[in-house]
Amino acid sequence: KTFDAEMNCYIIQKAGRGLGVFTILFEIGSFNKLLDEAICSFQSVWQKDKNACSGGGRRDLEEDGKDDDDVFDDDDDDVAPRNHESTINWMIENLIFREDPQGNVLDDPKCGGGGWNPFEFMYQTKSWHFYGYKGTLMEPPCSQIVEYRVIDTPAEMSKGQLAEMKRILFTHQDPNTCQYTSVHNKFESVARPLQPSQRSRIHRCTCRDFISDEQRRKEGRKSCRAGTEKQWMPNPTDLVPARGEQWDL
């Protein structure tokens, strides 16, 4: 199954012994307040880095483009060109931000200036269980140092939130070089191409392996019994592995 978006949160160890990454998958649905807090934090970084590149004013973000025929989504009313340079220009024109007389972007008042907690964000799925596997970084040098934990229950996000995330990602500038940092392709995606899973085993942790600390205190047990998963898990059904894939389920 293909999901509309995913968010990866990296747990970086000071000793540098690999990376832990937990992933939340998203489907288009209702507005997500917790995601909005994250978007506000990302927008703050976007604004800060844009301000660092604003010595030339708005010209730093302007690019020429001609193609205005295609759209991001067939259901959306806002026309966005497929051409890369035109897409950058369209997104900038459609971003909602305020500037001071010097051209610096001001904070979005709806964000309130607060941060977000990625661990609280993770718990919105109401699931503590996951698919796990050893993999590589999602960007060069793609080192084999990552332990992935993909939460087994997707969250929801609105179409508007997906569009806002794309705008922030696709129009972000490196504050040192003022070059665009996005590596999105012509399909408006930053997803890495699918990798063969034969190189690593995929396992699934369920309530038979552990339950939450709150459930342990309430029930006086450390795990659930086989056959009772529906009582403990919001998504007890396994995803069906593709033919030839090596899954430990």
Image (cartoon, grey):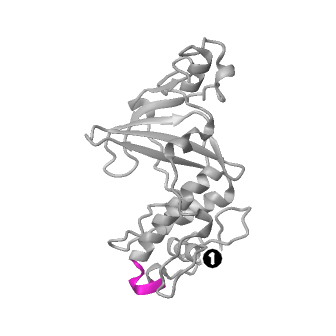
Q: Identify the residue shown where x is 62% and y is 62%.
A: 163
Q: Which type of secondary structure does the marked residue at label 1 adopt?
A: loop
Left/right placement of residue 112 relative to residue 142 reads right
- Number of labels in the image equals 1
Q: Where is residue 240 in the image (x, y as percent from the top left)?
A: 60, 28
Q: Residue 156 or 77: which is nearer the viewer?
A: 156
Q: Where is residue 68 in the image (x, y as percent from the top left)?
A: 63, 76
Q: Which residue lies furthest to the left in this view?
A: 15
> In which quarter of the view is residue 17 placed?
top left
Q: Is the magenta stretch mostly helix, strand or loop?
A: helix
Q: Residue 58 or 99: which is nearer the viewer?
A: 99
Q: Can residue 240 be seen in this view?
A: yes
Amino acid at the residue labelled 1: Asp
In this rendering, is residue 58 above or below 198? Answer: below
In this rendering, is residue 180 above or below 35? Answer: below
Q: Residue 33 or 85: which is nearer the viewer?
A: 33
User: Which quadrant would the N terminus be assigned to in this image?
Assistant: top right
Q: Identify the residue shown where x is 43% and y is 76%.
A: 51
Report crowding for label 1: few under 14, some 14 to 19, many 20 or more residues within 10 A (C-alpha): some
Q: Mark 1 points at which residue?
A: 68
Left/right placement of residue 63 relative to residue 239 reads left
Q: Give the range drawn in magenta.
A: 53-59
